[in-house]
Image: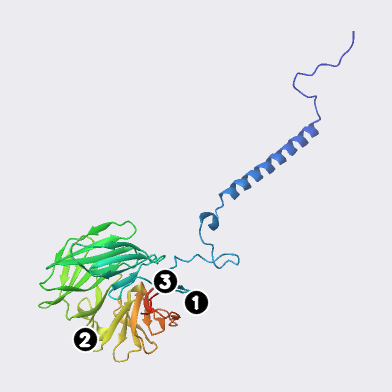
Amino acid sequence: MINRPPMQPQGRTPSRPRWFRELRFLAINVVVAALLCVGVVAVIDSRIVTAADLGLDQPTDSPTATAPSLAPVPPTPTPTPSDGYRRLTLEHVPATARFLQVSFDNLYYNYLDAGVVHIFTVSNGKQVHQITAPHPIAYSLLLDDADLIVYFYQSGTSITAKTYNIATHKSLSYLPFHVSPGAKIIKVNYAVNTNLVYVITRSPQDGDTVNRIDIMNKVTTRRPNAPIANFIPSATSLGLYYQSTTYRLYYNYTPVKAMAGRKVELIGRGANDQFYVRSRTTPNQVDVLSRQKGTIVRTFLIPAGALNFYCDQSTIYAIYADRLVDLTSKALHTVEFQNPGRFVAAVGKSLYFLPVA
């Protein structure tokens, strides 16, 4: 009989020393931990989304970043100079056009001509829509925070206000309101924060009337103290400043005490509901009024020769023959036109001109 070593159980290996088993267990744990770390890093890396992945512009202050892409350029642009402003020339605008405006996002421009509102794209100068009404449109206003046009038409003593959304092509109507016989719309403005529409009408027998339309379609009327030359609604209240045709300044139909005895022009509303006025006796002097305080909070001088003024939301520009001067910047920042055309609008970092006739 042959003596054989004892048989080991099937599937098992011969017994090993305890120190060997502990070393093997430690080695396995190290490998597993390494694999887990690699997996976690891979998952985290897969969840990191960069600006490039989302199709967004990278920060321009990064040394390797690319500059943000410009908005659509019209057929006749002027090369962007070193000051960062684009100069664009608008085409297809007839000499009879009124209320020419450019949208806040630099996508559209529109004007009123012969009772019809014409809407064009800035990118290619093509007309994308026109607005007509049962009667000739008398006034149009493009809001400064949305691609929305408010327009008005009149039938006898009834005036209808409607809105038109350029993006959706949808139109909504306010309830018609009545005015005095022979009354005509002379000025319109809109208060973004309060959603109030102000319509100034003038009639031979009753003079001027302020018609205020609220979001509930209620019309409130008020007769001002004097004929209105210019008016600007408050951004933070239901009130409004207006300047009479004799250059007197009023707030909520009461003479402004800070301007008592002075002749001024109301030229714009800046940030924090501050209103800018220019002296008629010293044309290069500008005063800034705080609506909340009712007092002058700043007085400064501007270069002589300002031809007019232009407001882009809370930025107010003085217009000169060859440049703009930003009155809301403390250093009175100057932007040269560098374009032979006639200036018509400023939206952000884009200046718009009409071709020389």
Q: Would you name the residue on which mark 3 appears? A: 348
Residue 73 appears in the rendering: yes
Which label's residue is closer to the chain start, 1 or 3? 1
State whether residue 35 is above or below residue 313. Answer: above
State whether residue 340 is above or below residue 193. Answer: below
Q: Which mark is residue 246?
A: 2
Name the outermost residue toward the top.
1
Q: Secondary structure at mark 1?
A: loop
Q: CA distance from mark 3 to mark 2?
A: 33 Å
Mark 1 nearby-residue class (10 Å; few <14, some 14–19, many ≥20):
few
**Which color scheme did the rendering employ for the protein?**
rainbow
The residue at 50%/76% (across/down) is 81
Where residue 79 sits: x, y (%)?
49, 74
Q: Secondary structure at mark 3?
A: loop
Q: Nearer the viewer, mark 3 or mark 2?
A: 3
Which image quadrant for residue 240? bottom left
